[in-house]
Image (cartoon, rainbow, N blue to C red):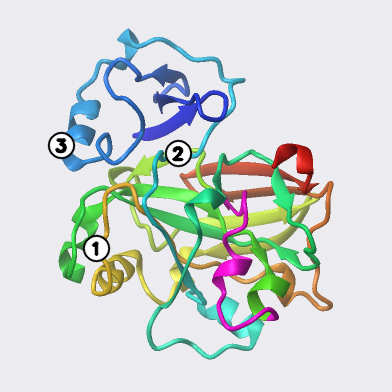
Amino acid sequence: MKLLRVGPKGQEKPALLDEQGIIRDLSTVVDDINADAISPENLEKLRQLNLSEFPQLDKSLRIGACVANVGKFVCVGLNYADHAAETGAEIPSEPEVFNKWTSAICGPNDNIIKPKNSSKLDWEVELGIVIGKSGRYIDESEAETHIAGYCVVNDVSERNFQLERGCQWDKGKGCDTFGPIGPWLVTRDEIDNVLNLSMYLEVNGKRYQDGNSETMIFSPNYIVSYLSQFMSLEAGDIITTGTPPGVGLGQTPPVYLNAGDQIELSIQGLGRQQQTVVEYSEAEA
């Protein structure tokens, strides 16, 4: 299934993209695409619906973040061997973990706001894991049963804030709009092999990232198990799993985003995002 949320910000309706590409309104059966809706039991109920009975929604409607009320937005860095090489970093022996604040979450096609004093705004196409069943100390062999599905994430990053303003990455990763997720939450049964998904990212029509999840160092199942040793993972949590090479920081010389730049990114089977970079405006604050 491809679950999504459509409508103005704060007024999104839960929906499903059917096999004909029609967006179906699910608001009569679930309140939202949230922790409750994506539990294993409720996903099975959604699979049994006769979708032809549900109203169609206009495809021109805004697409919101594919999961509502996210509790945690946990990230893994340097998880692609070829990306670690382009940054000059050693292959990590354990996952490098940081966080995005949930206030960073936005729709897949919403504008990316360039923060005040930003000078090194960067991009990262990433595979996102959506937790569907809560757990702690999860065995790797059981990790997949805790995954509701996957989504596209743009791990937008401000490298000056991240690398030159102290010892923590988080403040360069969690600014407002730095976490577009979606367009869809694709349930894991629709993905044949999560470790063989092609992905790309383009800026102003130029392809910078062109990778595949096969170069991941730590698999999604391992990441879920690993993180659960340090925190409870709860339904609705998002985990983003690292990026292939081609980020702006890795170019010679480095290339960074400016207002007016157009970003397009996609992962095989998970849909496409498109964003425009805009300057921060006091009027939008």
Q: As shown in the figure, which amino acid type bears the numbered disc 2?
A: Cys
Residue 85 in view of the camera: yes
Q: State which mark lies toward you, 1 or 3.
A: 1
Question: As shown in the figure, which amino acid type bears the numbered disc 1?
Answer: Ser
Please give the residue where the numbered disc 2 appears in the rendered image. 66
Give the structural element (helix, strand or loop) at label 1. loop
Q: Name the residue under label 3.
A: 41
Q: Nearer the viewer, mark 2 or mark 1?
A: 1
- Cα separation between marks 1 and 3: 20 Å
Q: Is residue 120 toward the left or the right of residue 172 in the image?
A: right
Main secondary structure found in the magenta portion: loop
Work out whether 47 lies above or below 104: above
Mark found first going from the N terminus, 1 or 3: 3
Q: Which quarter of the figure has residue 125? A: bottom right
Left or right, 8 with reference to 163: left
Q: Distance between the residues labelled 2 and 1?
A: 22 Å
In the picture, the disc for residue 232 is 1
Residue 130, how many percent across, how many down? 35, 50
Callout 3: 10 Å neighbours few (<14), some, many (20+)?
Answer: few
> Which quadrant would the N terminus be assigned to in this image?
top left
Which residues, given as a range, are shown in magenta? 164-179
| Most foreground residue, 81 or 106 | 106
Disc 1 + disc 3, Cβ < 8 Å: no
Describe the element under mark 3 as helix, strand or loop: helix
Q: Which mark is residue 145?
A: none
Q: Which amino acid does label 3 sit on?
A: Glu
Of the image marks 2 and 3, the number of the one nearer the N terminus = 3
Q: Nearer the N terminus, badge 2 or badge 1?
A: 2
